[in-house]
Image: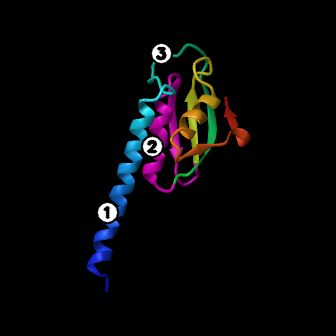
C-alpha cells in the first residue's frame, strides 16, 4: 500500500522537472545563438540526422525540437526520444550542423556529438 508521502512526491518531482526544462528553454531562447525561424530559404535544403544525448522522456524530444527550429535556416526538425536522434531539414547557407550542435549543447541538458553524423540529400 502506498503511503500518502509517496503519492504526493511523484507529481511534485514531475512538475519540478518540467519547470526546470521550461526555464532552460527560456534561457536558450534569449541567447545570441538563436535568431528565429525564417520561412524563406536562400539555398538548397539538406537534411542531417543528429545523435542526441540526455533525452529521458518525450518532453525532452519536444525541447530539443524547439531549440533546433528556432535557429535561422532550420526548416524542420523531427526528434525521436526512442531513437535518440533528430533529423533536421535546413539551409546550409544559413545554418551549419556545428551551430545546431552548439545550440542544443547550450541547454546544458542535451547534447549532440557530430562525429557520427549522416547527411541526407
Return the x and y of residue 1 as percentages of the image width and height: 31, 86
Circle nearer the N terminus (2, 1): 1
User: Which is in the foreground here, disc 1 or disc 3?
Assistant: 1
Task: Name the residue beneath numbered marker 1.
Answer: 12
Residue drawn at x 72%, y 42% is 116
Q: Are the residues flagged by discs 2 and 1 in contact, CB closer than 8 Å?
A: no
Q: CA distance from mark 2 to mark 1?
A: 20 Å
Q: Residue furthest bottom?
A: 1
Please rate how many residues cluster around mark 2, counting C-alpha atoms within 10 Å: few if below 14, some from 14 to 19, many from 20. some
Q: Residue furthest right?
A: 115
User: Which is in the foreground here, disc 2 or disc 1?
Assistant: 1
Asked if residue 71 lies in the magenta stretch, the reply is yes
Return the x and y of residue 43 as percentages of the image width and height: 59, 15
Residue drawn at x 31%, y 82% is 2
Q: Nearer the viewer, residue 102 or 118?
A: 102
The circle drawn on residue 40 is: 3
Task: Name the residue beneath numbered marker 2.
Answer: 63
Please rate how many residues cluster around mark 3, counting C-alpha atoms within 10 Å: few if below 14, some from 14 to 19, many from 20. few
Side of 78 where 26 appears, left or right: left
Q: CA distance from mark 1 to mark 3?
A: 43 Å
Circle nearer the N terminus (2, 3): 3
Return the x and y of residue 84 as percentages of the image width and height: 58, 50
Q: CA distance from mark 2 to mark 3?
A: 24 Å
Q: Is residue 94 above or below residue 68?
A: above
* Magenta highlight range: 56-84
Amino acid at each position: 500500500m502506498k503511503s500518502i508521502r509517496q503519492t504526493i512526491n511523484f507529481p511534485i518531482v514531475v512538475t519540478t522537472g518540467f519547470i526546470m526544462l521550461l526555464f532552460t528553454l527560456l534561457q536558450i531562447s534569449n541567447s545570441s545563438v538563436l535568431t528565429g525561424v525564417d520561412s524563406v530559404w536562400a539555398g538548397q535544403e539538406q537534411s542531417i540526422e543528429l545523435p542526441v544525448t540526455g533525452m529521458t522522456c518525450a518532453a525532452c524530444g519536444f525541447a530539443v525540437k524547439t531549440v533546433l527550429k528556432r535557429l535561422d535556416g532550420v526548416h524542420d526538425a523531427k526528434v525521436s526520444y526512442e531513437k535518440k536522434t533528430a533529423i533536421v531539414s535546413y539551409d546550409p547557407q544559413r545554418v551549419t550542423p556545428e551551430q545546431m550542435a552548439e545550440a542544443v549543447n547550450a541547454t546544458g541538458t542535451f547534447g549532440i556529438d557530430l562525429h557520427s553524423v549522416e547527411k541526407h540529400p
